Every structure is written in C-alpha cells, then in structure tokens.
Image (tube, helix red, strand yellow):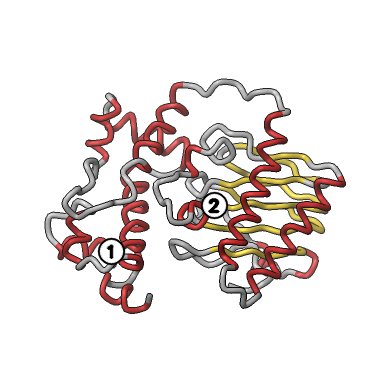
Amino acid sequence: MTSASLIPDRLDYDQFTVQAFDTTTMTASQLAMPYRQRSAYKISLYTGGTALVQYAGQTLTIGGADLLFFNPLLPYSCQQQTGLTGFYCEFTNAFLSGVDRSASLQESPLFRLGANPRFHLDPDQTAWLSETFRRMLADLASGYRHKYELLRTHVQQVVHVALRLQSNQDPPPPPGPATRLAARFLQLLERQFPVASPTQPLALHSAQAFAAQLGVQVNHLNRVVRAATGRTTSGHLAERIAQEAQALLRHTDWPIADIAQGLGFAEATYFNRFFRKQTGISPKAFRQQC
C-alpha cells in the first residue's frame, strides 16, 4: 500500500492502518475509488475540500468537516474530489474487539444497515479529531510494545465522539421490512463466530439454511441481501468463513482437518479448495506465513 493511496490493499484479519491524505498531491490512479465493497471497516475524517461519496445507494455531499463511518459489507466510492484533505483508518472487527472476537460491529449503531454514516463537525471537534488521528499515525510508526492496544483506544475515542453526536440527532426513520431482513441475516451470520471448537461446527453454512432459519424463501433472501449490500447470502457466507479460517490458522494450533470440520466442511480437501479460491493460497502456506 502506498502512503498516498485512498484505497489500501486488502487487510489481513486483525490488522489496522491509518493514513493522512491530500488529494491535491495524488495521481488519477491513486484517486480512483470504484463503487464496491471493501475488506475492512473504515472511519474517514474530512477536514477540507469537496467530494461526492456514494454509500449503499446514498449520495453524500462532502464540504467542510465531516466524519464518516463505512461498513465493508456496503459498497461505497468517493468521486469528484476537489482539494480533499483529512485522515482515515481501516480495521477489522477482530482488531477493534481485541481478544473478544464474538463482538460484532455489524450491530453497532454507527455501522449497521440503515444507520446515518455522516456527522458534521464544528471547528473544535475537527481539531480534536485531527489531533487524535495524528496520534494514531505516530503510535503506529512507533516501536511501543503495546501500540495496538493504544491504537484501539484512539479508535474507540473517535467512535464515542460520533455516538455523542448521534444522540443529539433526530432518530432515523424505522427501517423497512427488506432492510430489517438483511440486517437479521447479517446478525445471524455474525453470531456463528468465532468457532470455539472443531466439535461444534457451524450450524448454518448455506443460503438455504439461513433462509429456513429466517422463515423466508432463499430467492427472496438473496434479492433482499443483494439489494441492501451488493452481495448475495452465499457471497457473505464465503467471505466470513474465509475470515474465520484465517483467524484460526493464525491464532490456534488446530490441525487443518479440525479447522475444516469446525467450519462445516465434510472433508479437508473441500476446505483446501475453498480457501485457495478465496485467498489464492493454501491453508498450509497461509499458516507458514503467519
């Protein structure tokens, strides 16, 4: 990843990155930001300039100081950027929740489906948040042994600023049936993780199983989830299983066959084929790189 790019390379399961940006110094290729999903949660602090942000079917006009929260399951892009300056950080659910990987940002009032992703800032809020992002940059570059715990605290401080601002806003209109169904699917998906034991495999590992659990037809569930997030139920499930597989390969000493069993694969060979398709590398090679 280049320090100037607005689009970091794909993050590993428990990584964190933070950058400052100034679009006046960036090339066209660095500015390119296609409308798609990402692999990590993102918080952007815009301190100057203008842009149009497309996020989950909304068009947000950036002008002045704004704080935005992006859910990786919802597609977004940033276009027509003029003199845009600020900071962003990206992180996975595992990074922010620390050792408690059962906590899910999908249910956060800032990241969940239907949440208001943008907060306008006054000069004092902008100055405080800018300094917080500068501390993130300095801490990430430092050799401090516990810097990731410190970075997690900085991110949580930014989150609490937004939660306080959110409490002063008018409540958003209640979500419609389709949004509620898509949100229920994402919550049900996340509640299956983390996998605690190979002897307690995933209970739901197909679109049909999720549809049955939610009491709807699988085609209807696929249409609703795709409309809300840009991806099918099967796509979400494959992505989440691949993330959990990477976490288990990195953080446990379970044999690969046990990981396959815990993730609902009848045979390790099926898991190996799935993992290579999702990541471009075999489970064994991935573990050796960790």
Which residue was labeled with disc 2?
41
Quarter of the image holding residue 244? bottom left
Label 2 Cα neighbours within 10 Å, binned few <14 / some 14-19 / many ≥20: many
Instruction: Tell me the amino acid under the disc marked 1.
Output: Phe
Q: Which of 153 and 165 is in front in this view?
A: 153
| Sequence-first tag of 2 and 1 | 2
Q: In which quarter of the image is the N terminus?
A: bottom right
Which residue was labeled with disc 1?
275
Instruction: Tell me the amino acid under the disc marked 2.
Output: Tyr
Residue 263 placement, left or right of 225: left
Residue 12: give x, y in percent of width and height. Answer: 45, 65
Furthest residue in direction right, as rendered: 123
Secondary structure under tag 2 reads strand
Q: Residue at x 35, y 63 (%)?
A: 246
Residue 130 placement, left or right of 234: right
Q: In this view, does 117 lie above or below 96?
A: above
